[in-house]
Amino acid sequence: MWLSRLFSGRKGAQYPKTLHNKGSGDLIKGEMKGSKTSGGFTSDFTVKDSSAYDFLWTIKSFSKLPADNESKQTSGRFEAKGYSWKLILYPNGNIVNGQISLYLMLSRATSHPTEAVFKVSYELFLFNQKTGSTLSQKGENLVQVQDEMGFRNLIDLKGFKDSSNGYLLNENCMFGVKIFQVVPIQTNTECLQPVEKISHEYTWKIENFSKIDKKKSHERKFTAGDYLWSIVIHPEGDQKSDIKVKGKNMSLYLYYNGSI
C-alpha cells in the first residue's frame, strides 16, 4: 500500500552538489561500519545489507543546520535505474515547522526530452542507529526532471531529536532511498504563447472561376503576424454542407497552420 502521493514540483531549480562544509553530511554508497558505544551506535553504524538501498546519506552536526522552513540540504547526485537523482532534506519542514521533510528529486534524464513525464515508485528511509531498523514510507508519483517527490512529515522533529528513539545520535543521522521502478509516460504536449493582436488583410483573386474544377477544394496560403494561414474554398460546398444545398453553395474556410 502506498502511504503517500504528495510531491512538490520545483521545476528548473538549481541546487548545490554538496553542502558538507555546512554540516549536511557525507555521501555514502556501500556498507557502513562503526563501533558500539554506551549511548548506542555511533553515526557510522553498520548497515547489514547496504545493497538493498540505492543511496545512503549521513547528516552530521544536525543542530548546525539552519532552522527556518525554507532551508534545505541537498545530497550529491547518484545513479539508479538509468537516471540521476538527489535527496532533499528540510530539517525543520518545508510547509509546516516542527517536522522532518524528505524528498527524492529526479535530477537528470538525459535520454528523454525535457518535458517528459515519469511514473516513479520509491521508498525513503530513516535509520534507527540503536536497533538497525528503519522508519520508511513508500510513494508513487508522476514527475518531471527537477521535481521533488516524497513526504513533508516523515517524522515529527521532537521525536526525531529524542535520542531514546535512536534516529539522531551524537548529532548524526542517516537517510536512505530505494527506487523500485521508473516508467516514462507518453503524454501529448502543447505550448500556449500569447501574441499581439494581428491586423492583416489578404486578397485572393481567382481568375476564370467558372473554369476551375468545382469538385475539388482549392487553397491559397499566406502569412500574417509571423504565422502561416490558408484560405480554402469548395466551389460547390464541402462534405459538411447540407445535402439539399450541396452544389448550390460555396464553402469558404480560414485555417491557422502554425508559426513560420
Image: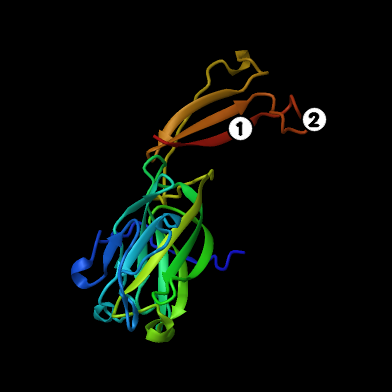
Residue 9 percent location from the top left of the image: 43, 62
Q: Which residue is labeled 2 in the image?
A: 243
Whichever of labels 2 and 1 marks the residue nearer the N terminus, that label is 2
Horizontal side of 244 relative to 233 (left or right) equals right
Which of the two residues, 238 or 28, is positioned nearer the viewer here? 28
Q: Residue at x 45, y 33 (%)?
A: 202
Pointer 2 local density, CA inside 10 Å: few below 14, some 14–19, many at least 20: few
Question: How many marks do you count on the picture?
Answer: 2
**Identity of the amino acid at label 1?**
Leu
Does residue 162 appear in the picture of this structure?
A: no
User: Where residue 82 appears, x then y in whole percent?
Assistant: 41, 44
Identify the disc placed on residue 213.
none
Q: From the viewer's perspective, is 33 left or right of 124?
A: left
Q: Crowding near pointer 1: few (<14 within 10 Å), some, many (20+)?
A: some
Residue appearing at x 39%, y 74% in the figure: 129
Residue 227 found in image quarter: top left
* Horizontal and vertical percent position of residue 30: 34, 56
Q: Is residue 125 above or below residue 110?
A: below
- Residue under the point 49% across and 62% down: 123
Quarter of the picture containing the C terminus is top left
Q: Is residue 250 left or right of residue 137?
A: right
Amino acid type of the residue that numbered disc 2 sits on in the rendered structure: Ile
Tags 2 and 1 touching, CB below 8 Å: no
- Residue 97, horizontal then vertical, whole percent: 40, 83
Q: Nearer the viewer, residue 79 or 260?
A: 79
Which coloring applies here? rainbow
Q: Which element type, helix, strand or loop, lies under badge 2?
A: loop
Name the residue carrying label 1: 252
Using the image, determine if residue 134 lies above or below residue 229. Answer: below
